[in-house]
Amino acid sequence: MNSIAQQLKARFEKAFTSAFGESYADTDLMLAASSNPKFGDFQCNAAMSLGKKLGKPPRAIASTIIENLDIADICETPEIAGPGFINLKLKPAYLEAQISEIAADTRLGIEPVKTPQRIAIDFSSPNIAKEMHVGHLRSTIIGDAIARTLEFQGHDVLRINHIGDWGTQFGMLIAYLREVHPQALTTADALDLGDLVAFYRQAKQRFDTDETFKETARQEVVKLQAGAEDTRRAWKLLCDQSRREFQVIYDLLDIKVTERGESFYNPLLPAVIADLTELGLLVESDGAKCVFVDGFTNFEGEPLPLIVQKTDGGYNYATTDLAAIRYRIQNDNAKRIIYVTDSGQSNHFAQVFAVARKANWIPEDVEIIHIPFGLVLGEDGKKLKTRSGETVRLQDLLDEAVVRARQVLLEEILKKEGRQETEEFIANVSQTIGLSAVKYADLSQNRASNYTFSYDKMLELKGNTALYMLYAYARVQGIRRKGEIDFDNLDAGAKVILQSDAELVLAKHLLQLNEVVNAVGADLLPNRICQYLFELGQKYNQFFEQCPVLKAEEPLRTSRLILCDLTARTLKLGLDLLGIQVLERM
């Protein structure tokens, strides 16, 4: 089902062709939702821009457009305002028919895309032998929300977890563990991940200060790359242990990913160097092999190379990223490749993409995008850290959110309503609220911006929060229970009746979901869904306060029940696209 805007656009395009000829078929219609309801629902401002071209007054042009415009089934008679604005007001009968149509559709009127793509999304990407921290939060949940939206649209999405499971750090850690805790290299889970992280820090300090140890670590890397059995076994144990710890958080956040770490691409790296050499793009600089591309300079204004092979013959992130691009295009057949990382990596990816294009590895029909995001800040406006100055563990952050959600549930909801609930109910609702609050607080921000992390703000009952959305959904379910309503078996032939302003406003907003989902599929900004849901919650609450539902007489009662159910289904779908579960009762 096309959105209202799409339907109007098609009618106006026909009108322009009829009025001014085929050459005006692609005219910018300047058609948009009205910013002020007193001017109607939509406004077309194209007449002003056509004044000079047609040599006529804009009001006369607007009049000609209206004469050729066939929208009597959608809108009231169009009005010309000011110098030539065309104001449009939607007919209640049209809105009623549209609401009935999407209410009968399990996808709420959102058709799958006509040309689905194979899309690879690279997100989350923690490092082995390190705990997931707050820095992984944004990549993980932004990437998941984008993946969910594209999947709902009908695209074939490959969710790639490009974990850091290869390189110098493993030689360093294995060499150190051989000295201080050799059992960890032969026995599964001989160390807790937290202890492993501590040993990693000690190994890094030793690596930076002890030349003999540094050489030992490098030899371990050589053995790892050569496939030495004991080193490979040790590496696999470390990876398996970290992987299990990561999965605990992924399960908690309901994140699905396909692991494909740096080690996956290791066999492909020599071919990257060979092909760049054959293309004549490699330049040796201070012993390293580099590629120079226009537009990249250092602080001194000198050309900035992308190093793809170090002086010691080793490879780096850039080499792996180039191999990954080639694999995702050639083997995964991805037509759209999306990288979800912090904005600090923007220059790196810009260079990598530029080199891949210079090598003609990216076909014209493949789109590669870096989705940058800002920092998570503490309430002091600085990068979020613990009191001791350490990076906040993601597990600790999520646990604290659940604890605080429990306090809100007990004090702000159950106590005020005088309710007693089972421990199972309290634990389940607290976890859902806490995790939803963390996700929603992040996703409701423009991803490119930094945002301040505040448990108090994200757990507010009012405002643009997950709790507000969950409460709105639960309110509809409360109507269902109180009236013993079976929403699945409402009168199939019941007519939707939109009489009051609150009903009309709610209906118009419900019909905008299609546009919002398609916009997010295009610009990859999940905060659009959050804003839409927040406004939906507000409009539903106004409807709920002004329009009796269970006490209304038929046929108005069933009509309003349809609006309630459609609102709940819309909230549920929108929240699901954000990776948030709803609650039937709070």
Image (spheres, rainbow, N blue to C red):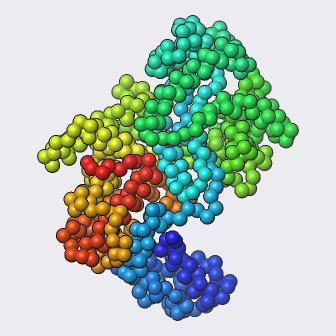
- Whether residue 383 is visible to the viewer of this picture, yes or no, is no
Q: How many marks?
A: 0
Where residue 269 sits: x, y (%)? 75, 32
Where residue 294 sits: x, y (%)? 74, 46
- Whether residue 4 is visible to the viewer of this picture, yes or no, is yes
Q: Is residue 91 above or below residue 480?
A: below
Q: Residue furthest left?
A: 418
Q: Which residue is rendered at x = 59% and y = 84% of the image?
A: 14
Q: Is residue 395 above or below residue 45?
A: above
Q: Is residue 195 left or right of residue 156?
A: left
Q: Is residue 233 above or below residue 330?
A: above
Q: Which residue is rendered at x = 74% and y = 49% of the image?
A: 362
Q: Is residue 464 left or right of residue 123?
A: left
Q: Residue furthest top?
A: 179
Q: Is residue 375 left or right of residue 292?
A: left
Q: Which residue is rendered at x = 57% and y = 24% of the image?
A: 239
Q: Nearer the viewer, residue 532 or 557?
A: 557
Q: Nearer the viewer, residue 486 or 87?
A: 486
Where residue 252 sits: x, y (%)? 42, 36
Q: Is residue 241 left or right of residue 218?
A: left
Q: Which residue is rendered at x = 48% and y = 49% of the image?
A: 145
Where residue 384 sits: x, y (%)? 40, 35
